[in-house]
């Protein structure tokens, strides 16, 4: 296995102030600022209360049968969590990079061939250092782009691009308002073609509430943080752009609070909290963008346990919708990743961690309208 860097688990636990608690339901690191904990009080009120809605939007669920999970027999990467898994523009290959299993940090690269459910390990040129808790997106004309992450005591703020045709990495230029090195941020490509990132955690225990955007043509970052009314500083959350052009952020972890359940929208230069029923509190959940909605699966709960449920967060609807699944579902977990196979109308999930350790299983979810062309 290429690019693997092993550190001691004791060192990793000591430094991962924003890492979801392994097995023992511990809260965030005491290194993080106490002010963030105070700021979180409004955001985490009544975390245990779940929404009461059970209706499912007919436009998002197949008409012939309810959504159903199925385990796939696809041997591939070693067990891990906190990796990235990103589908290319063609929708035929999904690239998995990095992640960790306890104190083992990975820098390997794998291609999952969606046409025949086959993993292939790639051996590209020298590229990003082994890491976990990084972000990855697909950028047309550039390829797979990786940002930030952590390995032991080292935090990153670098940008790398993988050219899929030549299987080569290159470092992208980074100037302007460069983000502080961080782990557990979130990233998405905006309608303007820029890479947007928001929030995160770094080595001195600081959590962030900033938002920044990277222009690929200029090779420069811009600070896009609104002047006030920010979501509480956090990490281990997710964000995505809605079809109506808003950057949306959900959940995560803040100082002294293992899991959050607030949802926010950034539009017209201001953050606004979405007032409605949201999924129960969670961090490090898997998510995938569908047609007009985002699907959220699993994650770590506020008590340190793990979720196995699925939710639809639809654009323009303040209320998240619990999604009933037929048959067996993947065991509860956090730190997994999902990709959309729009051509075959399915969603795939790989890896993560439960109370016993890291996982290496691959699952298929069918029966959801994915917005395939």
Image (cartoon, rainbow, N blue to C red):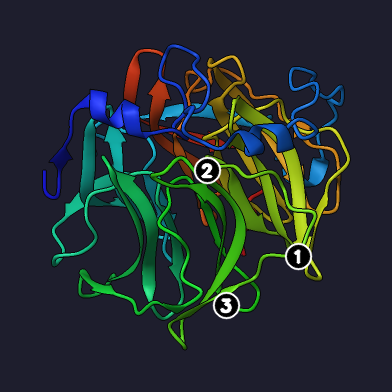
Q: Is residue 257 left or right of residue 32?
A: right
Please give the name of the residue rendered at 34% of the width and 34% of the height, measured from the top-left corner.
15
Question: What residue occupies the far front of the structure in this picture?
Answer: 34
| Quarter occupied by residue 36 | top right
Tell me the distance, in whole angstroms, between the alpha carbons under discs 3 and 2: 25 Å
Q: Is residue 294 visible?
A: yes
The residue tagged with tag 1: helix, strand or loop? Answer: loop
Along the line of sight, which residue is nearer the eye, 234 or 236? Answer: 234
Q: Are there few (<14), some (14-19), or many (20+) residues within 10 Å of tag 1? A: few
Residue 62 location in percent, x, y? 70, 40
- Residue that mark 3 sits on: 193
Which quarter of the rendered picture does the N terminus lie within? top left
Please give the name of the residue rendered at 68% of the width and 29% of the height, measured from the top-left corner.
66
| Quarter occupied by residue 24 | top left
Q: Which mark is residue 227?
A: 1
Q: Earlier in the sequence, mark 3 or mark 2?
A: 3
Residue 204 location in percent, x, y? 41, 43
Along the line of sight, which residue is nearer the eye, 49 or 118? Answer: 49
Please give the name of the residue rendered at 39% of the width and 39% of the height, measured from the top-left corner.
82
- Residue that mark 2 sits on: 347
Please give the name of the residue rendered at 84% of the width and 46% of the height, measured from the top-left corner.
274
């Amino acid at each position: 296995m290429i690019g693997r860097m092993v550190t001691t688990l004791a060192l990793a636990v000591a430094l991962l102030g924003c890492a979801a608690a392994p097995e023992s339901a511990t809260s965030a690191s005491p290194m993080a600022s106490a002010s963030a904990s105070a700021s979180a009080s409004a955001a985490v009120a009544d975390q245990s209360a779940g929404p009461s809605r059970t209706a499912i939007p007919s436009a998002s669920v197949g008409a012939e049968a309810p959504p159903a999970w199925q385990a796939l027999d696809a041997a591939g990467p070693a067990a891990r969590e906190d990796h990235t898994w990103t589908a290319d523009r063609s929708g035929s290959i999904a690239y998995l990079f990095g992640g960790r299993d306890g104190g083992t940090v990975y820098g390997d690269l794998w291609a999952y061939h969606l046409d025949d459910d086959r993993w292939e390990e790639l051996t590209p040129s020298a590229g990003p250092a082994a890491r976990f808790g990084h972000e990855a997106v697909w950028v047309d004309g550039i390829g797979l782009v990786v940002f930030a992450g952590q390995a032991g005591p080292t935090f990153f703020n670098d940008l790398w691009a993988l050219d899929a045709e030549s299987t080569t990495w290159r470092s992208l230029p980074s100037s302007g308002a460069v983000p502080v090195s961080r782990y557990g941020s979130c990233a998405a490509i905006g309608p303007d073609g820029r890479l947007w990132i928001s929030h995160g955690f770094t080595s001195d225990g600081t959590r962030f509430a900033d938002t920044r955007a990277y222009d690929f043509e200029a090779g420069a970052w811009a600070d896009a943080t609104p002047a006030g009314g920010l979501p509480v500083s956090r990490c281990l959350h997710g964000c995505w752009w809605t079809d109506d052009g808003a950057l949306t952020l959900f959940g995560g972890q803040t100082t002294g609070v293992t899991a959050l359940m607030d949802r926010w929208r950034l539009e017209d230069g201001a953050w606004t909290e979405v007032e409605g029923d949201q999924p129960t509190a969670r961090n490090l959940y898997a998510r995938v963008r569908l047609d007009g909605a985002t699907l959220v699966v699993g994650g770590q709960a506020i008590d340190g346990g793990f979720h196995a449920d699925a939710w639809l967060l639809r654009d323009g609807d303040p209320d998240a919708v619990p999604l009933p699944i037929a048959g067996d579902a993947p065991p509860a977990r956090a730190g997994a990743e999902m990709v959309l196979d729009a051509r075959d109308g399915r969603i795939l999930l790989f890896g993560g961690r439960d109370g016993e350790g890291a996982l290496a299983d691959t699952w298929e979810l069918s029966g959801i309208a994915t917005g395939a062309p």
